[in-house]
Amino acid sequence: MRFVKCMALAAALLLAASCKDARGPMETELYHWADSTACALMTMDAELPSGSGKVAENVRMELTDVIDGILGYITSYENERMVPAYDGDVSDPKAMLEHYRDGAFGVISRLAQGDADERKAYILEDEDFTDEQKAEFLESFPRWEYEFSLQKVDETDRYVVFRSMDYVYMGGAHGGITGAGCLTFSKKDGSRVADFVDASGAAGMQPLLIKGLLDYYAECGYETTWDELKDGLFIEDGFIPLPSWPLYPTDNGLGFIYQQYEIASYAEGMPSFVVPYSDIEPFLTTEARSLLGL
């Protein structure tokens, strides 16, 4: 039976090309905050462009939309807005982050307290528990956790990459990774480059995706063949879809990251790999070729 936990590899791949010596590095401002209640803990580590030029302003605007899309709908499974959209000055990232920080922490705190109150009432009313068992349960309530992270992880003279990857735990069996993945911006005008390959080319990329997955599992300590692996993946007819998170550039090739449960079980982490540019080049979009200088 396969039981591979390799989420650390996904994080390593995201950081593999970080801090390269690049011309004209984008200046950023780091923001860290943490607070907790008896039932909830929330941390925020955000890095946003701090300059006033066109590129910095456009990237900051795009990242503000990303933050709104995540924290504005925090804990919502039905696309229900939980925190009002920020309507202040986008050139003031600190004020914007504090708006979403306060709103999101308020939501997390309120829902976590409600969850704890319901659990407490259930335990106290259950006559099958002894007083000792009730006391033990009441002392071991799971505390909700939300770790928001948005950081610059790669930069060249052509592009800059920010990584959005959060950890969420809401009292269940285990926590999970959420976020928007790696977001790539052109340093020419600050526009976001989301489509590195044409989705219609996924069929032609199957050999590359198969090799990437086999390499991922091998690095996680599980040597296998494609015939053995595909039957345990959450895919149809052995066809590997492109990941829902955007692809991202690295020194050596294009990075792929599949989220938890996207194509594999939770225990198998987040299947991740890099496809060399020499192999992926035939499938690159015109925009991607221009960005990468290919």
Image: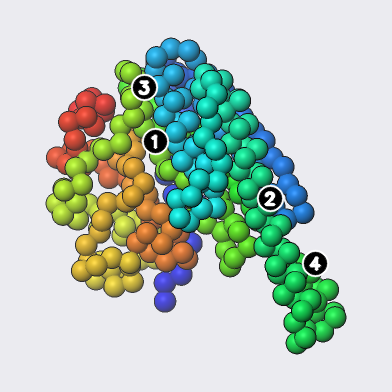
Q: Which residue is mark 2?
A: 109
Q: Nearer the viewer, mark 1 or mark 4?
A: 4
Q: Which residue is mark 3?
A: 190
Location of residue 21 by image quarter = top left
User: Tag 1, which secondary structure?
Assistant: strand
Position of the C terminus by quadrant: top left
Q: Which residue is mark 4?
A: 139
Marks 1 and 3: CB-CB under 8 Å?
Answer: no
| Residue 51 vertical position relative to residue 17 in the rendered view, above or below | above
User: Tag 2, which secondary structure?
Assistant: helix
Within-10-Å neighbours for mark 2: few <14, some 14–19, many 20+:
many
Give me the C-alpha separation between circle 1 and circle 4.
41 Å
Q: Which residue is mark 1?
A: 183
Within-10-Å neighbours for mark 3: few <14, some 14–19, many 20+:
many
Sequence-first tag of 4 and 2: 2
Give me the C-alpha separation between circle 4 and circle 3.
50 Å
